[in-house]
Amino acid sequence: MPEQKKYTRKLTYNERLFIVADEICPPLLNQLFFDGEGSFDAEMWSRAVEAASEANPGSRLVLRGSLGMSRWEDSGSAPRVIEVDGSVWDGMGPDGAPFLQKRLMPRQGPTCEVLLIKGDPLRVCFRTHHAVMDGRGTLTWAEDIFRALRGEPLIGSRSTLSDLELARSVQPEWRTPFPRDNIAPTGKTSGSERGVTWKRMFIPGSYNNFLGQVAVLAAREAWKHQQGPVRFGVPVDIRFRRKGLRSTGNLSIAIYIEVRPDSTPEEIAQDVKKQIDEKRDCMIDRWDPMIRFLPLGFLYKKGQEMILNNAAKNRYGLSGILTNMGKIPMEIFSGGGFRARAFWGIPPSLENTPFFLGMASHDHTSELIVTMPKNLAGGNRIDTVLDAIRSGLVAV
């Protein structure tokens, strides 16, 4: 059998921005969790991660080259499996979990790792640098790890297809940027504290049109503080645009919804469907591809300026980002003595995103996890907006 060619792929413009974002506000990672019960066998997990990462070399990447020649290469080294003590962490916020602040370094590696978090409940966390994977890519890798734990055949992925290549093969039109004048769901900035924080809330029941309801409720919270436009980005996994595509890469592109005072959740859902039908999930700005050729130092400086400017004006490129991971089957993410009972993730965010809400559901429970800048979250405002969304949701 001929030896496989070493896995490598170009660094995309989005991934370049994620690298810069990680320098400005580290760590910029996908951190996906499965809460459960049972036991951990660290050696078994290490073998499973090694096998699954061989089948999915996108989990072993390190950055090489510079500017337009930047590329990801397979390091050949399996991501590490680390046991940590989570006995004093409740899983509802950052307090008590310093292990979630550790960075993953694009050039030195590793860019992915697995945490086995001991406590009650047990938790498994899949941490991937956002420059190498999106949320769906992370789950693709995790699925094969659990297959290995159960002794099942691995599926694997070696796709090198980029978001730009896939998008341009589907949608030849360019997107027209909208004004960067949107208001935040928690009002104006307060104080000068830098960084982001997050909070998790889970609620019983199932909810129809989860995203549409949340968009309207979050917009109403914004208008309690000031008047102005409210727009949300909604990341769309565009893998479905290429039949049979399986990839661990960054293949999510946002569509944008504007919420007006008279908007209904049903209208939001119709708008999302219309945009996807029109293939606007594959529409990018004309100058986005040029970002690949801009120096990281220049992008870092511009990113810092944007954060300070947004905070000073209390206006943002978006009011927030809303992402729904959908209903996750727990049996797929169980194995090796661990049985998953819940799924959730911390939205990877930066200070120029005033509100990033992640949604997921499992069994008869829905999860809400929000990340936001500390200067917007203080004074219990992060709790207030989550409570307002929870109380306003209408269950099926």
Image (tube, grey):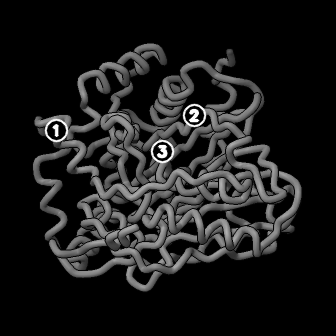
Q: Which residue is mark 2?
A: 326
Q: CA distance from mark 1 to mark 2?
A: 27 Å
Q: Dot 2, how many residues are within 10 Å of its Cα: few (below 14), some (14-19), or many (20+)?
A: few
Numbered badge on residue 304: none
- Badge 1 local density, few (<14 within 10 Å), some, or many (20+)? few
Query: What's the residue at 15%, 72% (across, down)?
Result: 68
Residue at label 1? Answer: 175
Quadrant housing the C terminus: top right
The residue depicted at 43 percent of the width and 64 percent of the height is 58
Q: Relative to residue 370, is residue 303 depicted above or below? A: below
Residue 49 on image: x %, y %: 62, 67
* Residue with the mark numbered 3: 187
How far is the residue under mark 3 from the one under mark 1?
28 Å
Tag 3's secondary structure? loop
The residue closer to the viewer here, 53 or 194, is: 53
Secondary element at tag 2: strand
Of the two numbered discs 3 and 1 on the same chain, state the one appearing first in sequence.
1
Tell us which disc is closer to us: 3 or 1.
1
Tag 3: residue type? Answer: Gly
Q: Toward which corner of the image does residue 46 lie, by quadrant?
A: bottom right
Q: Choose the circle earlier in sequence order: 1 or 2.
A: 1
Crowd tier of the residue under label 3, counting other residues whose Cα lies within 10 Å: few below 14, some 14–19, many 20 or above: many
Vertical side of 181 occupied by 277: above or below: above
Which residue is at the far front?
1
The quarter of the rendered structure image containing the N terminus is bottom left
